[in-house]
Each structure stands twice: as structure tokens, then as C-alpha cells.
Image: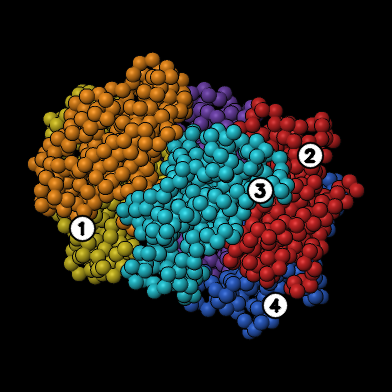
Chain colours: A purple, B yellow, C orange, D blue, E cyan, F red
Amino acid sequence: MRPSQRQLDQLRDIKLTRQYTKHAEGSVLVEFGDTKVICTASVEESVPRFLKGSGSGWVTAEYGMLPRSTGSRMDREAARGKQSGRTQEIQRLIGRSLRAALDMKLLGENTIKLDCDVIQADGGTRTASITGGCVALYDAVNFLLAKKAIKQNPIKQLIGSVSVGMYQGVPVLDLDYAEDSTADTDMNVVMNEAGRFIEVQGTAENGDYDAEQLQQMIALAQKGIAELVVKQKQVLGLL
Amino acid sequence: MRPSQRQLDQLRDIKLTRQYTKHAEGSVLVEFGDTKVICTASVEESVPRFLKGSGSGWVTAEYGMLPRSTGSRMDREAARGKQSGRTQEIQRLIGRSLRAALDMKLLGENTIKLDCDVIQADGGTRTASITGGCVALYDAVNFLLAKKAIKQNPIKQLIGSVSVGMYQGVPVLDLDYAEDSTADTDMNVVMNEAGRFIEVQGTAENGDYDAEQLQQMIALAQKGIAELVVKQKQVLGLL
Amino acid sequence: MRPSQRQLDQLRDIKLTRQYTKHAEGSVLVEFGDTKVICTASVEESVPRFLKGSGSGWVTAEYGMLPRSTGSRMDREAARGKQSGRTQEIQRLIGRSLRAALDMKLLGENTIKLDCDVIQADGGTRTASITGGCVALYDAVNFLLAKKAIKQNPIKQLIGSVSVGMYQGVPVLDLDYAEDSTADTDMNVVMNEAGRFIEVQGTAENGDYDAEQLQQMIALAQKGIAELVVKQKQVLGLL
Amino acid sequence: MRPSQRQLDQLRDIKLTRQYTKHAEGSVLVEFGDTKVICTASVEESVPRFLKGSGSGWVTAEYGMLPRSTGSRMDREAARGKQSGRTQEIQRLIGRSLRAALDMKLLGENTIKLDCDVIQADGGTRTASITGGCVALYDAVNFLLAKKAIKQNPIKQLIGSVSVGMYQGVPVLDLDYAEDSTADTDMNVVMNEAGRFIEVQGTAENGDYDAEQLQQMIALAQKGIAELVVKQKQVLGLL
Amino acid sequence: MRPSQRQLDQLRDIKLTRQYTKHAEGSVLVEFGDTKVICTASVEESVPRFLKGSGSGWVTAEYGMLPRSTGSRMDREAARGKQSGRTQEIQRLIGRSLRAALDMKLLGENTIKLDCDVIQADGGTRTASITGGCVALYDAVNFLLAKKAIKQNPIKQLIGSVSVGMYQGVPVLDLDYAEDSTADTDMNVVMNEAGRFIEVQGTAENGDYDAEQLQQMIALAQKGIAELVVKQKQVLGLL
Amino acid sequence: MRPSQRQLDQLRDIKLTRQYTKHAEGSVLVEFGDTKVICTASVEESVPRFLKGSGSGWVTAEYGMLPRSTGSRMDREAARGKQSGRTQEIQRLIGRSLRAALDMKLLGENTIKLDCDVIQADGGTRTASITGGCVALYDAVNFLLAKKAIKQNPIKQLIGSVSVGMYQGVPVLDLDYAEDSTADTDMNVVMNEAGRFIEVQGTAENGDYDAEQLQQMIALAQKGIAELVVKQKQVLGLL
């Protein structure tokens, strides 16, 4: 039995709120249960140096947690003067994942910066960030299309992400903190709307896992991400 | 005429939402119109080194802005590796102001850390932070009383803050961004619930001001802060 | 009775020594009693990026204290790898205040950098820095005029600064360290030579203050700054 | 056909040289073809603060590349003043992976620090680091046993790691730089000597991959790691 | 002929002013012609960790230049967030040199920190710092003796330093900036009052030098340092 | 008797291995006995800003130690976020010394960066770095000549370096760690192939030394460097 009383293959309540703040070209509050992340997408009409003159655009991401988004207060990274290894690992994952959503040639020499800031953490902040970030990215692209800064829509596909894990020997979908902190294996999966993999990261926190368990977790993730993509399409008016 | 159509002595819509997030001992969303700040108060059962063994507690504050809380995206301070001078100036002001709310002896050797994170900026983020932070502080003190970590209530007084300024030659209350960015003088005032000053900071951004104008602005601030304290008391159930 | 035996409205001995060091375009040793600050003004024939092509110039300031300018040795900020919040707050104040002295259009695309380095501290280092820095700025402008780098004098007005405070319940002028460290309220006031305000910063360190006390302190500051401006004019040969 | 003429399931030449340098308790030069990494294991008779008094030990890792280990010179991280996100991501992976080799209780309150420094890079530096680091770790444990600092051998299992990927549509084992830089998918797999997973990280650099391809890559990795574990056992005299 | 019209073996005007500032236990303004350095010595009743419990004391030094101590303004190291290699090289030299002045056992577990801050630079700032720092150190030791924190005088010998160099093919003593910036060889020599070497650092900036030239420079340095030690003794009342 | 049984004027076994790694234009493993340093020379077709348009090139150096190159593990500088004063002092020395090898005009606007990374330390790492770095520099110049990026050979002379010192009252050549850590005086000497000085740095670690001892050490260094230059010429095929 899961602490949250959910079924093994049941997502938490998922909410995606567009136009959450007023300044950003894309701005989404994503909620996976009690996990709440503000994802903004900001458009810049330039590209990093390695792309200057290439005709291609870029997508990059930054991630942060409010100091008291967690059960006990974490030091503020801006005050400590550097981002933790965990933060860097996560924002690299978000950036890689969301670059898969776009055709960079069609984006032209524009950069879209995703900022994913965790307001309240209860497990799965990186998967919520990717899922909500994709919607913010979509809105930023719409902004570029509306002002005719680009001619053709560069969106190739929606990207969703969810965590799966082995909890008390059983594969479960979308771990919350109570599960995540005691799980044997924690796996973050990123997929496109066609159900194909963009990224798989599975860590045996405690012990190890075999190919069959890997398969079971992968299957759960596929089911969960398919549901997340439906949520994305609903909120974007694509369904 | 003000861009927002407000009267010269009229505050923006003020909202204080308690228990905004679930982990912090005090957690408040404060809104001054479109300016939105999450203020959390975290309790630590220890004090900075200079107070060890003194029997007294401490209150300190940190301030941050989400990168896209503003019209154009600002670099993330955690990524740049240091907090700006503006950030440090503001968090020092918030800390000083809220220390005036408490009797540090009655707080005992506990520290309350305020985190004020701006979700959306439209002028007056520091005054909103102080006003909302005071409510979060109040809730954190209630937490300490409820768990009997302290015996006597250390709250001496509520603290509120508002900006005033000379806008097109006329004193106005609670400047929003449209006013603030073109005002001749910008003054931030912090007062206690008895209407006495804790801090006054007035800067002639453009030109200078005389003693009479100073008086006019001060009078406006007194009116505004009195109204803010009423809001604080309402949300805290003290009225 | 003040520890220094001064009258309530009496400044400390004020000395302004021009050409204190030989390399800078403006170089002043300012002494407010035992507080001694070297203020140098350096001319650069360029402006920060946000002013490129605007035709306007800029004034900026940096502040530092020698490690043993104080009663107990402070860590060297260069060795710690960052400037403290207090340092940043002060140098922002100095820069803002001295920008009020100049017409930036007449300065052309030149930058004047003020460096205020405290050799010996006894209270009031920021007000001494502004007062002495204004004289160094004046000399740097003279340098630009003499080499015909600018055609018209951009000096609009002299700027002076002094601290006032409530000490043992009484308003006093120009607090030294013995007073400053125990004062109830500490207020730094910056004015132009016409006696109008550029900046007012008043902090209740201990308790609070009311509008009448604010008025009394302001009046003292006006008297003190008027005397400081006379000193500036004397040393600059304007009287 | 692979650029290196290897079979699809063929590892590069693997060499593990123990006692490569003289100071460290464990010191291994690991070579995966032209990729060369010095792995040292250093014993410290203490543990990080969060383990003080727990009776348990710890394993941690740091990773670096010599500036000219790569085709074009990279900036030295020590000179830039911070480690890149990539470096942090890799050293977190190495540390997590090698902690799986030990029973931390049996290690007692000792810490083993792995330093993996890339002398020459040709793809797969992180998997070489884990594979070589495990041998260095083994030697450091032997050192502790020999000096009777611990009573019982804490080694639970050997850990090996290899990369696999989709190269021109075909799954290949142990990618070198020529393959890695153009692969569609790059997957790093960490397994124990029983062939069970410790970590799986698969990234679609270009496009995406499906569950069948995931399976094929996983199978290749299992074959490769089994061979690497044989190499480890040979050099450790366990076969 | 030297630009300053000095004889080849002639020092600049040397001034040592004790009690230059009021807070430090030792405080000296040292002038080698136009080079002016404030040297303060601060006493701390503790030692670095590696000396705890050893019964021995320590002497350490820090060095800085005011931004406009030089012909063109240098960036402030505190603002850049790190000390330059040159600064570190110099402060290490000053610390090593002045440790030779004391018997660390007799100093007991006390630390004396020298701060050498260049007010105006005209060549030879490191040699002036050592020469002036030694007098400040002497005064700090007197302070410890006067308050009976140590029983026996730990001063072993006075230490002086001067630069010599090959200027236009001729060995000269005590180079000023005009000479230093065009010299073929620049050598800094540190000696004790007995005329024996503590440190010799000679760099061929331009070309090279042979053993005979080395001898000539060394002989000049011996003469110069003997004169500097007389100055130190005079100002300390030892002659 | 020396701990290593060497004669007083005997170098350790010296080995210079060219083409040690495959990517750098020059790559040398230098061994002075158990001291092992990888020296790579990287060519960049640009110069630092202060040389842009001058027609001259530049040589610069960076130095690092692997964390466990030493008897006890040192913190990694990249993780600490800054290079130590010792590191900076050494890399400045290497750069200065090797710039003496080249005619910068003939190098044209190219930069050669030397990276000296200590794999195993046993005393004399900086002198080994200079001696090995010179060979790597030579190979990088050959690379530029071979690809006709420069027309004329800019090598003026080979540069070698060795340490000498007073060990138990006797001058000895090429100190290893056992000697270096207890020597009274430690001197690093850099010479060109003509036996003339480029740099002399002699520090009395313990006590002092006189002119005669200086002469004796210098003579030993001349003998040792002459032998090192023969080694350089042999490995470069110049003998």
C-alpha cells in the first residue's frame, strides 16, 4: 500500500496553470500533487556564441528551489555563491530534454531560457519541471509566431517526464517524497508524445535491480507520460 | 492622474494569504497589486555565534527575485555566483525592520529566518516583503509557542512598510513600477503599529526634495502603513 | 554631555586635503575627527555598456576599509573573495549621492570612479566619503576641463553628507563611534549646497522615533551640511 | 563499420595498472583504448559530519580532466574558480556507483576518496573512471585490512561500467570519441559483478529511441561489463 | 644617469612613521621616496590550527594596493572576488621574511598579522612593506610585552629589504618605477641586521645576467639594507 | 650523506618522454627521480588583449597537482574554487622562465600555453616543470613551423632549472622531498643553455645564509642545469 493510498500505476493530481505570472513569454505553474514548480520561458533574440551565424536557435534551462520549499530549510544557493552539483545535474537534464521538443533550425537564432523554480517540494521536482516547462516553451514559441519573429512552428513534439521506482519491492508510478526517500530504485524517464525515450536515468539507491524490474518500471513510465501528454494537450487546447 | 487611476493616497489591492506553502513554520503570499512575494519564516533552534550563551534570539532575512519576475529576464544570482548589491541592501533592510517586531530576550536562543522571494515584480517588492514577512514571523512565533519552545510571546508590535514618492511633482502612496521608474523621489518607510518610525530611506532619483515634501511623503506613508497594519491584524484574527 | 565634549550641534574637526596622492586625477584625504578616508577620483574615457552611444557620462563609487582601520581587525574582503553587504550598501549610496553633483550630459561619455578607502574609522565613514569624494570629483572634472576633454563644466552643485542621531534621547550632530555604537537612532543625510535633500536614511537601531524627532534630526543635519559645504568651497578656492 | 574497425560488441583494449603512483593507498591507471584515467583512492580516518557517530563509513569521488587531455584545450577548472556542471554530474555518478561496492557498516568511520583524473580522453572517461576506481577502492580496503584498521572486509561486490549507444542506427559497445560525438543515443551503464544494475543513464542526443533499442543496448552493456569484471578480477588476483 | 639623479648606490628618502593610525598594536607609514605603504600589525591571541597546542606563535601577512595607488586605476581585488597571483606572491614573501625576525617559541600561541596596504606606488612596494612591517611587528611585540602576555622578547633580529637591478647595463640600488619598468634585471633581497640573506629573488625581465652581475647586485643590496636597518633602529630608539 | 645516497652534486635520474599524450602540440612526461610531471604545450592562434595588433606572441603557464600526488591528499583546487598562493607563485615562475626561451616577435600573434600537472611529487616539481616544459614548448614551435604558421624559428635558447639548497650545513644539488622538507635553505635556479641566469629564488627556511654559501649553491646549480640541457638536447635530437 502506498502512503498516499494511490494505485501502483496512479499519478498524483496533475495541474498545469498557464499565464501564471505576467511578464514571461511562457509562464506555467505545474503541480504534481504537493510538488509545485513555476516554469517560465523567456525569449532572447540572440544565441550563445557557439551558434552565432549558424541559423539555429537554442533552449537552455535553469533550476532552483526556494530555501523553504523543503521540509527543513536549505541554504540559498545565491548566498552560498554556487549552485550545488544536484542543481546543475537537474538543469542540464531539463535543458537536454526540452531541446528535443524543437527543431532548432526553425527556431532561428533565438534562445528560449526555461527557469524552473520549486515553490514547494514533495518529490519529482525535475519531472514536474520538464512536464510544465514544455508547456511554457510552447507558449514562448506561440509568442514568437504571433509577433512573426519566426515563420514556421519549430515544435516537433511534446515532452513529458515522470519518475518511477521500486518501492518495497514493487514498481510504482510518480513517487512522492515519502516514497522517494525510502525507495530501492529511483528512475526518471523522459519521453516524447510518441512514447519514445528521450532520457532514462535509473539509480539503485539501495541494492540493485535487474532487467525485468527495469522493464516493469519503463512500462509504468510509458503509461504515466501518456497521461501527462494528454494533460499538456488539454491545457494547450490541442484536444 | 496616476497610471493606475488610483487616488494619490490610495494603496493598491493588498492581499495576505497565510499557510501558502506547507513546510515553513510561517508562510505568506503577499500581494501589493501585481507585486507578489512569497515570505516564509523558518525556525532554527540555535543562534549565530555572536549570540551563543546570551539567552537572546535572532531574526534574519534573505531576499531573491525569480529570474523572470521582471519585465526582462535577470540573470540568476545563484548562477552568477553572487548576490547583487541591491539584493544585499534589501535583505539587510528586511532583517533590521523585522527585528524591531520582537523582544529578542523572550525569543530565547532561537533564530527565525525570513525568506522573501519575489514571484512577480511591479514595484515595492521590499515594502511588500516587510509587510508580508511580519505575518510569517507572527506565525513562526505561534509555532514556537504551540510547541512550548518559548514561554512568553516575544511579539512587541506589528511592522508594516510602504513606499511613497514624488511623482510628477505630487506626493503619491505605494508606487507601482510605472510610477517608480519615473518618480523624482522614492522613499521607503517602515513603521510600527503605533505609527512610529523604524526606518526611513528617501532617495532623490532625479533632482532633490525639500523639508516640506519630506513631510508630505511621511504623512502619506503613515496613512498607508496604518491601513496595512489593519490588513495584517485582520488576516491574523486580531481584529 | 557627549563623550567628545562637543556641543549637540557641533561637527568634529573637519579637514579636507587635496592632492593627497599623486596619481589620481582627484585625490583627497578627508578627516572627520579621527575618521580618515582617502578619496580618489579616476577618469576613464568610456562609459558602462548601458550608456554607450548615449552621449552621457557616469559616476560610480567603490568603498573599502583597511583591515585594521577598526578597533579589532576585520577580514580583508579581497581575501574572503567578496564584499560584504554593508560595503555594497555604502558604495551604492556614495555613487548615487555623487551622481547628483553632475550633469551627465555635460560630462560626455566619460566615467569618473570614486574610490573611498578608510584608513582609520571612528564613525561616519560613509558621510565623510561623500563629503570628501565630492571634492575629489571636482578636481577630476577640472582635469577634464584643463585637457579640454569636455567643453562645459558639468558640476551642478556640491554635495555634502553628515550623520545625525538620537543619543541618550537627544538629537546630536556628526556621531563618532562612541556615540554611534550606542545611539537609539542613526540617520545619514545627504544634501546639496542649496540645502535640499538628495538622500535620507534613518534607522531606529533601538526602539523607534517619531515625526518630531525626525524633524529635529533633519534640522541638525541641515546646519551641519551647510558648514561642510563651506569647508568644501574653502578648500576648492570658491570662497 | 565502426571507425575503429571493432566488432559491434567489442570492447577497446582494456588495461588496469595497479600501484601506478606511490603515495595513494590505491592507485590505478585505467585505459579503455586511448582513454587514460589515473584513479587514486585515499583513506581518511574520519567521516563527513552527517555520519559522525553512526559507525558507518563513506565513499566519495572527484573527477577532473587535464586541460589538454582533449583535442582542443579546455580551461582549467581551478583557474576558472568552479567545476562545470558536467564535472559535477560525473563525479556524483562515480561516487554513487562505487558506494554500491561496499558495506558501509563494515567500513567503520572511515572515508575513501576516489580521485579520477583524465590524462587523455577518447570517449568513455566516466565509465573508465568507475571501472578503474573500483580497483583502486579495492586496494585501499586492502590497506585498511592490512593495518587492521577494520576487521572484516567491507567489499560486497565489484562494480564495472561501460557505455553503449546507437551509432548509425546500430547498437554498439564502448563508444570512442569518434562514435560518441556522432551517436544518436549514448547510454552509460553501471552494473555489479552479478550482472544487476546500479545505474542506467541513457540520453537521446539526436532523435529518440524505443524500448527494443533500449533492450539491445542493455544487453550489450551486460556483455561488456561482464568482461570488464573479469579484467578487474585478473588484475586483483581473484581469478 | 638615473632618472631621479640619485647615485647608483643611493637609497631614496626613507621615512618610517610609527603610530600612524590609532587602532593597531603596531602601525607604521613607510615611505621609500614616493612609494608609501601603511603597515599595521594586529595581535590575535590564538594560532592557526596546525599550531594549536604547539606552544609556538605565528606571523602572517596580507598585501593590497588601493585601486588608484598606481598610474592607471587597477580593479579592486575585493570587487573582482579574488587576489591576483602577484598579490599572493608578495604577501607570501612578506610573511616568510618577517617570520625570520621572531623566535616563534617565545611568541607563545599568539599570531601577529601584518597588513601592508599601498597608498601610493612608485616601485619597490614589497621591499618597503617588509622594511616597514618589521617596525610594526616590533611595536606589536612591545604591546604583548607591556601587557605581560609574553614574558621574554621574541625578537631575534631586524629584517630589511631593498630592490636592486641592472639598469642600462649598470647595477643600481632601490629602483623606482621609472627604473623598474625598464630594468633588465630586478632583484629583491631580504636580509637580517647581521647582513645575512633571508631571501633573494632575481628575475631577468629582459635578457639574462651572469654570476658577476649577481655579485654586484648583492653587494649593493647589502649596503642598502645596512642603511635601512639603521633607519629602523633610529625610529625604534635603539640607536 | 644524502638520504638517497646521491653525491652532493648528483642529479636524480632524469627522464624526458616526448609525445606522452596524443592531443597536445607538445607533450612531455618529465621525471626527476620520483617527481613526475606531465607538461603539455597548446597552441592558440591569438594573443591576450594587451598584445593584439603588436605582431608579438605570448607564452603562459598553468600548474596543478593531482590531489593525491602528495603523501597526504590535498584538496582539489577546482573544488575549493581557487588556486592557492603557492600554485600561482609557481605558474608565474614557469611562465616567466619559458618566455625567455623565445623571441616573441618571431612567434607572431600566437600563444603557447604550458600546462604542468604533477602526477607524483617528490620535491622539485617547479624545476622539473620548467625543464620538461621547455621541451614541450620546443615541440609546439616545431608544430607551428611544420604547418608554416610561422616562418622563422623563434627559439632563442633552451631553459633548464634545478633546485639547490643547504642540507645539514652542506650545499646539495636537486633536493628530493626528504631533503627539501628539512633543508636550511632552498634555492630554485633557472638558467639558459649558455649558463646565464634567468631567475634565482633562494629562501632561508630556517636560519639564514651568507654570500659564500650563495656562491656555492649557484655553482652547483650551474653544473646541474648544464647536465639538464644535455638531456633536453639528447631527447630533442640536437646532439
* Residue that mark 4 sits on: D142
> Distance of mark 2 from mark 3, alpha carbons?
26 Å
B1 w.r.t. F58: above or below: above
Q: Nearer the viewer, residue C113 or B165?
A: C113
Q: Which residue lies at the image location 70% right of the left edge and 34% below the top edge?
A: F57
Give above or below for B143 relative to F19.
below
Identity, as a three-letter code, of the amino acid under mark 3 = Gln
**Subunit ID for the residue under disc 3:** E
Marks 3 and 4 share the same chain:
no
Q: Residues within 10 Å of mark 2 (few under 14, many from 20)?
A: few
Q: Which residue bears the numbered disc 1? A: B102
Name the residue located 28 percent from the left edge and 51 percent from the top edge: B95
What amino acid type should be assigned to the residue bearing mark 4?
Answer: Asn
Mark 1 surroundings within 10 Å by alpha-carbon count, few (fewer than 14), some (14 through 19), many (20 or more): many
How far apart, in angstroms, are the residues tagged by discs 1 and 3?
72 Å
* Residue that carries the numbered disc 3 in the rendered image: E216
Nearest the viewer among C106 and E218 is E218
Do marks 2 and 1 share a chain?
no
Few, some or many residues within 10 Å of mark 4 (<14, 14–19, 20+):
some
Q: Secondary structure at mark 1?
A: loop
Residue labelled with disc 2: F156
